[in-house]
């Protein structure tokens, strides 16, 4: 029989389960939410600038003027970062340009340049990240034409290439440095002239080389002739000195000395007396 309480209620044989602590669960959820928000803020506020780049900061599309160097940085999460390379870049230009006399030359040029990191924000604000196409390449073309038009085709093909190269580099430095681009070097890779003009220049150069070679040969022959003249003069002077130093008395004395040496030797000899005035004894070996 089931037990019935006096109050008319039924006894279900045990107590009801305890309700969970809603306040504690809500606190834990709040803490987790805060941690997630903080992590997201850190993620949005952290940016990395690769090697050889700078970061230009913008806020709602407006350039702030701040730049970030290489590495990891914490920034305002509302700001954006535009990464620009400050490494050396190369632009190659092949153009047909006029010479001083109006001839058209084919000129291949290479330009080495890089972005000035201290002016990266200014360049991005005034030109954009495609500054090489907008200002570098057009300025290079103009500088090439200005430099080549001041020289003749012959000079450009022979001895004025370094001068033209320096002129182009100076002009580019003057134009691009105020705009935030550093010019490192300008290289003239090749200069092509019209076929007829090239043949004429090469023929002229060959003639000049032949003339220089002939001049060298003539100079060498003159030096050889002078050497022989000096040598002959020396021999003549020597003979003159020797002739002046040899007298009949000296020759007679030398002959007497030689005869005495032969006479005192151990071998038997035959002596023939010559002219007593100016001759000397003739000494012969007997058989």
Image (tube, rainbow, N blue to C red):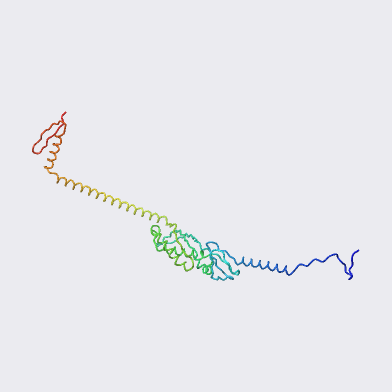
In the shown orientation, is residue 34 left or right of residue 19?
left
Residue 216 in picture, x, y percent from top left: 30, 52
Q: Quadrant of the C terminus?
A: top left
Q: Is 86 on the left or on the right of 252, as rendered?
A: right
Instruction: Kindly give the residue lying farthest to the top in the view shown.
Output: 287
Counting from the top left corner in percent of width and height, residue 141 is at 46, 63
Quadrant in which residue 173 is drawn: bottom left
Q: Please tell me whether residue 23 is drawn above or below residue 108 in the rendered image.
A: below
For this rendering, which residue is in front, 236 or 10?
10
Q: In x, y percent, where is residue 286?
A: 15, 29
* Quarter of the figure with residue 189: bottom left
Name the residue furthest right: 1
Above or below, comparing residue 103 to residue 248 in the picture: below
Q: How many marks?
A: 0
Where residue 82 sits: x, y (%)?
56, 66
* Camera-side residue of 192 and 53: 53
Q: Foreground residue, 39 or 91? A: 39
Find residue 45 and report its image quarter: bottom right
Is 40 left or right of 266, judged from the image as shown? right
Query: Vertically, is 244 above or below 88?
Result: above
Instruction: Please identify the quadrant where the N terminus is shown.
Output: bottom right
The one of 192 and 32 positioned closer to us in this rendering:
32
- Relative to 195, 56 lies left or right: right
């Amino acid at each position: 029989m089931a037990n019935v309480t006096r109050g008319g209620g039924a006894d279900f044989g045990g107590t009801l389960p305890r309700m969970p602590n809603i306040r504690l669960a809500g606190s834990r959820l709040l803490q987790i939410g805060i941690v997630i928000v903080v992590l997201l803020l850190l993620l949005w506020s952290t940016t990395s600038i690769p090697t050889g780049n700078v970061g230009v900061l913008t806020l709602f599309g407006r350039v702030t003027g701040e730049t970030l160097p290489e590495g990891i940085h914490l920034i305002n999460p509302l700001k954006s970062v535009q990464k620009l390379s400050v490494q050396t870049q190369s632009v190659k230009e092949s153009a047909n340009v006029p010479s001083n006399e109006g001839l058209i030359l084919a000129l291949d040029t290479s330009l080495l340049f890089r972005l000035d990191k201290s002016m990266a924000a200014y360049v991005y604000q005034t030109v954009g990240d495609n500054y090489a196409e907008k200002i570098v390449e057009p300025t290079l073309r103009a500088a090439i034409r200005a430099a080549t038009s001041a020289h003749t085709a012959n000079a450009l093909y022979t001895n004025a290439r370094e001068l033209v190269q320096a002129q182009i580099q100076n002009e580019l430095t003057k134009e691009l440095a105020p705009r935030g681009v550093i010019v490192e070097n300008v290289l003239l890779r090749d200069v092509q002239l019209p076929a007829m003009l090239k043949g004429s220049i090469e023929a002229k150069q060959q003639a000049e080389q032949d003339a220089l070679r002939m001049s060298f040969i003539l100079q060498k022959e003159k030096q050889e002739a002078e050497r022989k003249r000096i040598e002959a003069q020396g021999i003549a002077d020597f003979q003159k000195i020797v002739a002046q130093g040899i007298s009949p008395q000296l020759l007679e004395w030398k002959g007497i000395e030689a005869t005495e040496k032969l006479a005192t030797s151990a071998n038997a000899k035959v002596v023939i007396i010559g002219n007593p005035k100016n001759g000397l004894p003739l000494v012969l070996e007997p058989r």
